[in-house]
Image (tube, helix red, strand yellow):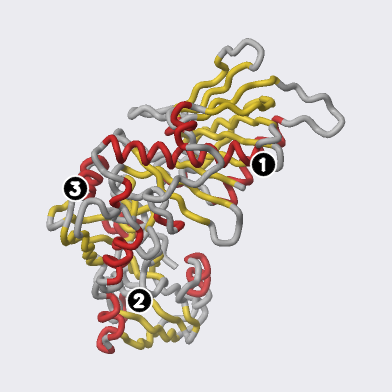
Amino acid sequence: TCLVMKPEQCSHMEQLQLVPCVQSVCYELKLFPSVLFSALCQVGMFLSSPVPGPCEPEDLIDGIIFAANYLGSTQLLSERNPSKNIRMMQAQESVSRVKSADGDAQTLTEVDLFISTQRIKVLNADTQETMMDNALRTISYIADIGNIVVLMARRRMPRTASQDCIETTPGAPEAKKQYKMICHVFESEDAQLIAQSIGQAFSVAYQEFLRANGINPEDLSQKEYSDIINTQEMYNDDLIHFSNSENCKELQLDKSKGEILGVVIVESGWGSILPTVILANMMNGGPAARSGKLSIGDQIMSINNTSLVGLPLATCQGIIKGLKNQVSVKMNIVSCPPVTTVLIKRPDLKYQLGFSVQNGIICSLMRGGIAERGGVRVGHRIIEINGQSVVATAHEKIVQALSNSVGEIHMKTMPAAMFRLLTGQETPLYI
């Protein structure tokens, strides 16, 4: 089991979304800005149901204690948003660094692990002195591996430059920067219960946060939300656009042998009606630009009868690179504007929008929610909200604008990678 808590870099209250991993006993817990999400919507449980977990919610508010052995701590370098597999590898690496090899004496300290909706404290079992004290919201990940518990926290960064963030390449994108992760390793017969209890503590904390802000969790009924979803059209006008034969084109591009196609492609974004790649840039004088048949924003369905739909970006790039020695290329595309139009219909503030934003970029999306219905896509940069540009708007103000919006919410977005290319923040690498 692996429970993962991801704090967002924002100054106001945060809350929880629980995302089930389909093919493993692994849950990812993401903290998002307040009012945007219902804590348990992804697993079909809303807050009108009892918060699932091994503990009584009232006990978690007061705090519970587990007996454990503290084996030690280590520090790792990590990207801002590593994959779930990498997170588990990091947990396993921290265990291998701290835990003594079989047959060697293990240095350990008996501790009491205190868990509440406010914090996680580690107390020396004999003296009851506090060895560690972490606010619950600062926890990044927690994993249980057999009888081992790994508690992981990314060190908080001040708003100014920080030594906790290491740029491996000057000017590297945010995702490529390395951050220091502190990993604390414990041994306990209740390892799985400890991990589950921490996950439950986040859920209970969010429920209490709702009540403190005048929102009755019982108002967030699953049936009522489902009824709203069923009245809304899917993907805004994407279905109409993609089914219009005038937008679907088969093109023939001529090029010289040994000449690259001269394009930059990016992912369309999770949540797209057809997950494929988008033309983000064209090299001046290159075959793609010379043809006059392609435009920035076009979605590429296939190349030389090989479908690109559903393929990873790297695979699509490899297919295009493989065209270098060909003199003719056949492409099937759907002509699309570079900016995606989103229309979210939110009848009341009590309904979660179903997506999260960090620094203007949509970083997660709730399957089946009103945002997915409206055309929101993961990895897109928000350009406008209700006709107002938010390109230079602070994260907190974007969150506030979204969380306070009700009725029809109109947005314009584009893939973040395309936005960086078009605004000169990145140098295009043509293929």
Q: Is mark 3 on a helix, strand or loop?
A: loop
Residue marked by disc 1: 92
Give whichever of discs 1 and 3 has the lower sequence position: 1
Gap between marks 1 and 3, in whole Å?
Answer: 42 Å
Residues packed near mark 3 inside 10 Å, few (<14), some (14 to 19) or many (20 plus): few
Disc 1 on helix, strand or loop?
Answer: helix
2 or 1: tag closer to the N-terminus = 1
Describe residue 61's horizontal placement relative to residue 72 as left or right: left
Going by the numbered disc 1, the residue's amino acid type is Gln
Q: Position of residue 114 (x, y in %)?
A: 55, 25
Say above or below: 374 vs 365: below
- Image quarter of residue 195: top right
Q: Nearer the viewer, residue 384 or 326?
A: 384
Residue 266 visible within the image: no
Tell me: residue 162, above or below residue 140: above
- Give the residue type that dot 3 points to: Asn
Q: In which quarter of the image is residue 111?
A: top right
Q: In this view, does 94 lie to the left or right of 135?
A: right
Residue at the disc numbered 3: 404
Which is in the foreground here, disc 2 or disc 3?
3
What residue is shown at x 40% (from left), y 44% (from top)? 16
In x, y percent, where is residue 361? Answer: 32, 52
24 and 222: which is toward the camera? 222
Residue 353 placed where, x, y %? Answer: 29, 55
Pick out the residue farthest to the top: 127
Q: Which of the numbered marks, if any, corresponds to residue 288?
A: 2
Q: Which residue lies furthest to the right in this view?
A: 103
